[in-house]
Image (tube, coloured by chain):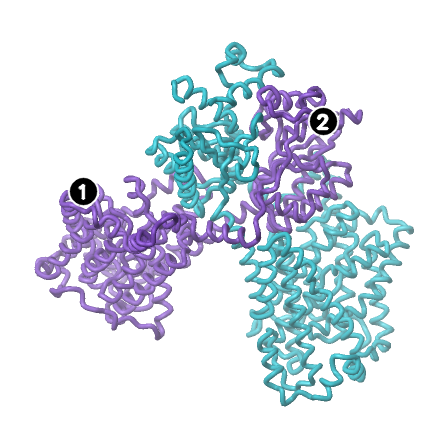
Chain colours: A cyan, B purple
């Protein structure tokens, strides 16, 4: 035993003149031990302040204001409220040229997309154009991304369409439907701006990528299914959006199936047939005010709020993800909370000017970026192009065939089903794939909000499950080093006679304290059985490596107390190694450190093994 | 630079003959590096099986059945279904003597407690006695604890009383009330047994101790408030249980305040006054069947189910905690899932024999233990004593004054307010204290089930918050060792020029991947500002110590990719140190390891620093 003793000491002495004299004098017997210290003392208020800052101000927004004159502070404050002041003063003709080119490019995309996405949301096509005019202008003043192209997007449009039309028919109650759409947009904006104002931006982190992949695919399938109505020529179609009612509606109205449509359908003939229809009347002129169409009472208010929150969070997730992507490509920062406020205000303003939910679109932002956009002026250029269209070119669009719209919708919708991403999830992380499937089938079979809730619930459950049943690993020493690693994973790692070294890979909380206590006792039983089988030397000490225990609560502390008591009954010593700052503090406050005694706490596993072995040797134990 | 190089090597060579020849030959220049290996290969099914086992079978219940003959397996199976077979064969007179003494002792406590707890639940006193007869008998056959004294308990009684009497008056609708109580008991048992059968025992872990302390105190205050009715002599008292309606009921019926009662009240005069009342008629005879009183339809079914689930989970928590406490004192195992089934079956049987919710009571079990109980036979003895009482001694109790009952109730209820425990929570863990207060005020001001739900929600939120905003620490080297620790906490730890060493203290999940990415980039900016201020040598490498990153998902992997890309743009290298098994596996599958290159992954921080420093030296960099 004690083969670790010399090494610890060797390691510490030759290169270090400041070693304690005791170690230098008696090199062969005394092991240098580093004590575990408490973190710097802080009052409860200081800790709360730090915690609060970490949660709500992780970006330290006031950092820039320190050590500045008052004049500078006012300028900085204006710049942070209206990012246009940051880049506006350096704006020149060269930048303008780039922005005009990219602005016109995205306008050519925004006009047909606006029209078709509005149809996806069961709204009059003109609303899509209105929505490509006011929100981009507002964003260009408030937003911090230079490349985000703002306007209606597919996911938010189809979610709004599917949620609202389940309760209100967009054809029979078109005015009510329009009112609901504007009201939802208002609540979406309010929700988004509040998240930003209250600095609750982390809420959108809970929509994980697997959730979004599954959700988008599910919503895309729902919209595709809705096309069955036109394809099969069914007149009495269900108003519901889920898979089962749609399919049963398709098959129960078999008598209504128009065989001619089906025969010609699926192929280009069906598509050609629809070209006979045209969009219909498109009024000339700018966005009419719509604040009188918002309503804050009545039977459908709850629906409007629900739709607003869901489309709000979805469009926020898309807008911020897109903004971050292009910011990181050009190496600038996009501030999440500020973006939320910008997107929120632009939607609230939009709801009063006949616009529905808008955000930064991925496809158009990519085109914008590639066309060489330099600042948010490209959004102003795009809005101007839409303005010209609204004022003078509307009659040209009168004859846009539904075929083109349908083609745009179908392309957009089918492109949303990202099966390759789902396959990659399956390969790398089965649980993420499961989340993705929950989200997909939840949306398809239950409903849009519930599907989303199920997927978020499953993601959160994964975190809880991980905390409830954490891993414990048995560590061994890698011969000739001070490294201790899992004996299962590293064949070089060998157990040290007399010790059972366990690493706990999770915080110790109420949710796992009982489990961990029982699991460690089971490890002890199993180790004793193994020793008995191999006639090894008796187990004397359990070392708990607490490096990965990032937090502990009172239940966890009690479990440690109880564990120590039960191990003591079996004449086993419990030793804690390297508790992190906050854990150490709580262990200290609860007096468990004192009850463990001097040889109950070490900084490294190596030091614990070396010191305890030499103590046992000194007492003549094997 | 490179002051770590020699040490790593020194550490590895002299004590270890198996060191690679290269190291032995060129001691001064080559650093011994241990590669990070993947965990042993497992199929997705094997991993799922292990995970499943960890969650549902952490106790490995089939362990005992391995390597046994079929005959032994049958016996073991019987023993595990009916623990009475385990100890029954070794039962002797000596054990019986102990059990009779303790059984009679707890019977003397169980009879008055049964009567008063039944009153607490607004049930006829005789039901309390019935409940002390059948359930203990069933538990003695099925239960695995040797010291648990089974019967009605205060918390479950007062929760049942407060929940049911909010909808149904126990005085005006006494039959319906009784039916609801039995039905709730049935559902409590069903819920408990299902948790055990489905091995979902970890559900009760979510009722943390702070939650229970607050909850119990809140419920106790509610019951005490209800005594105001009698104390003030108010006739038209509210049926509600919350603080505000009770208080407003007290003050709005001021005209009904009987000043005589108040004058005499609070003191012993009021108590003496109540002695005039007596319990009333107590029927002789055994438990009448009550299965005909259970009903599974009707308007109050939802209430009965809700009450059943809440009293079920509360009584389960108490019963299992008490069972575990005394088992650990005598060093035997109580199996959580089996206990749930035992308690569940005994309540289901109880609901058919005029009993209400029962479980192991802490106070009576403590008396049982101290009186020397050896096996569950003490429960049989107690039940027999109750049997004798029911058959012959009932008339004696006819004259038990309400005073005694009130005294027992008040003692029990006031004893439940554990302010000392709450103070300890405040001292050790402020957040646990907050949870406790949420639970207390939730129960007091909102309602019993919602108060409980709020407290559990707050506890879960704490876990999520911890995961959403994890700690990152800057590490430095403790001079003369291979130990790297937080520079904030250990003054001896000093930064190594050219490196920024960060430790992430949490799994990297969707919920924190964006935050961590931004936080690490902020660390980098702050470090570069610090270097600039002190004219230090340029930052070249970010080392991420992944020891405490116990898990990663696809969002986390993507964040690492993105982080590496962004650091590379700033000519900074990203190095990962010591990823745990499951993380390593996913990093490998997602090909991030390959993209990091040879010098992107190390087993220890020391090795990374030594190797990179020597590489830089070799390339002539400072």
Report which quarter residue B470 is drawn in: top right
Counting other residues with Cα less than 10 Å from the Cα at mark 1, is it few (<14), some (14-19), or many (20 or more)? Answer: some
Q: Is residue A507 left or right of residue B232?
A: right
For the C terminus of chain A, the quadrant is: top left
Q: Earlier in the sequence, mark 2 or mark 1?
A: 1
Residues at badges 2 and 1 in contact (C-beta under 8 Å)? no
Secondary structure under tag 1 reads: loop
Secondary structure under tag 2 reads: helix
Q: Is residue B131 above or below residue B63?
A: below
The mark tally for this picture is: 2
The residue indicated by pointer 1 is B371
Report the front residue among A557 and B616: B616
Which chain is home to disc 2? B
Which chain is home to disc 1? B
Q: Is residue A346 left or right of residue B62?
A: right
Measured from the top left, where is residue A35 in percent x and y?
A: 50, 24
Residue at the far front: name it.
B69
Residue A351 seen anywhere in this rendered image of the structure: no
Report which quarter residue A373 is drawn in: bottom right
Report the front residue among A113 and A100: A113
The residue indicated by pointer 2 is B613
Measured from the top left, where is residue A383 in percent x and y?
A: 81, 63
Measured from the top left, where is residue A260 in percent x and y?
A: 73, 88
Report which quarter residue B598 is drawn in: top right
Could you give the CA–CA distance between mark 2 and mark 1, rounded to whole angstroms?
70 Å
Name which residue lies at 63% across and 24% down. Answer: B8
Residue at the far bottom: name it.
A255
Q: Do callouts 2 and 1 point to residues on the same chain? A: yes
Name which residue lies at 57% across and 58% down. Answer: A456
Name which residue lies at 18% across and 65% down. Answer: B287
């Amino acid at each position: 035993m004690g083969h670790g003793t010399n090494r610890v000491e060797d390691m510490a002495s030759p290169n270090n003149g400041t070693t304690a004299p005791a170690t230098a004098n008696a090199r062969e017997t005394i092991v240098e031990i580093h004590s575990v210290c408490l973190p710097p003392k802080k009052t409860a208020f200081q800790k709360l302040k730090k915690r609060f800052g970490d949660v709500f101000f992780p970006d330290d927004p006031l950092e820039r204001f320190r050590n500045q004159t008052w004049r500078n502070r006012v300028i900085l404050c204006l710049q942070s409220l209206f990012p246009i002041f940051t880049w506006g003063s350096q704006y020149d003709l060269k930048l303008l040229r780039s922005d005009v080119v990219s602005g016109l490019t995205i306008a050519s995309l925004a006009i047909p997309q606006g029209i078709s996405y509005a149809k996806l949301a069961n709204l009059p096509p003109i609303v899509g154009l209105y929505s490509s005019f006011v929100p981009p202008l507002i964003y260009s003043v408030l937003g911090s991304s230079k490349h985000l192209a703002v306007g209606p997007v597919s996911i938010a449009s189809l979610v709004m369409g599917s949620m609202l039309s389940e309760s209100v028919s967009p054809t029979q109650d078109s005015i009510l439907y329009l009112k609901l759409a504007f009201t939802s947009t208002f609540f979406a904006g309010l929700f988004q701006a509040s998240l930003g104002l209250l600095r609750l931006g982390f809420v959108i982190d809970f929509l994980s990528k697997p959730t979004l992949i599954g959700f988008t695919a599910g919503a895309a399938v729902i919209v595709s299914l809705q096309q069955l109505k036109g394809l099969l020529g069914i007149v009495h179609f269900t108003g519901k959006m889920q898979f089962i009612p749609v399919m049963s509606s398709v098959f129960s109205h078999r008598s209504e199936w128009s065989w001619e449509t089906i025969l010609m359908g699926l192929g280009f003939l069906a598509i050609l047939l629809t070209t006979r229809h045209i969009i219909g009347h498109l009024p000339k002129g700018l966005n009419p005010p719509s604040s009188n169409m918002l309503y804050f009472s009545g039977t459908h208010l709850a629906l409007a709020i629900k739709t607003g929150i869901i489309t709000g969070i979805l469009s926020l997730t898309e807008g911020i993800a897109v903004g971050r992507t292009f910011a990181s490509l050009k190496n600038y920062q996009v501030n999440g909370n500020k973006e939320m406020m910008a997107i929120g205000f632009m939607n609230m303003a939009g709801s009063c000017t006949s616009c529905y939910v808008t955000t930064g679109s991925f496809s158009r932002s990519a085109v914008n970026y590639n066309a060489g956009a330099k600042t948010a002026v490209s959004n102003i250029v795009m809005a101007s192009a839409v303005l010209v269209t609204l004022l003078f070119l509307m009659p040209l669009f009168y004859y846009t065939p539904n075929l083109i719209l349908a083609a745009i919708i179908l392309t957009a919708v089918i492109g949303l089903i990202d099966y390759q991403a789902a396959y990659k999830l399956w390969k790398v992380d089965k649980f993420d794939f499961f989340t993705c499937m929950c989200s997909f089938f939840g949306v398809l079979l239950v409903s849009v909000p519930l599907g989303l809730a199920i997927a978020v619930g499953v993601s959160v459950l994964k975190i809880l499950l991980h905390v409830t049943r954490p891993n414990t690993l048995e560590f061994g020493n890698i011969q000739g080093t001070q490294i201790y690693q899992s004996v299962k994973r590293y064949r070089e790692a060998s157990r040290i006679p007399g010790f059972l070294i366990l690493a706990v890979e999770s915080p110790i909380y109420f949710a796992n304290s009982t489990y961990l206590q029982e699991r460690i006792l089971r490890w002890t039983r199993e180790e004793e059985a193994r020793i008995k089988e191999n006639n090894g030397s008796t187990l004397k000490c359990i070392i708990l490596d607490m490096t990965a225990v990032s937090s502990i609560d009172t239940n966890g502390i009690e479990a440690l107390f109880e564990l120590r008591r039960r191990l003591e009954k079996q004449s086993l010593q419990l030793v804690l190694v390297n508790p992190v700052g906050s854990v150490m503090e709580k262990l200290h406050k609860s007096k468990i450190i004192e009850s463990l005694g001097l040889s109950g706490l070490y900084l490294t596993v190596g030091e614990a093994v070396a010191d305890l072995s030499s103590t046992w040797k000194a007492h003549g134990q094997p």
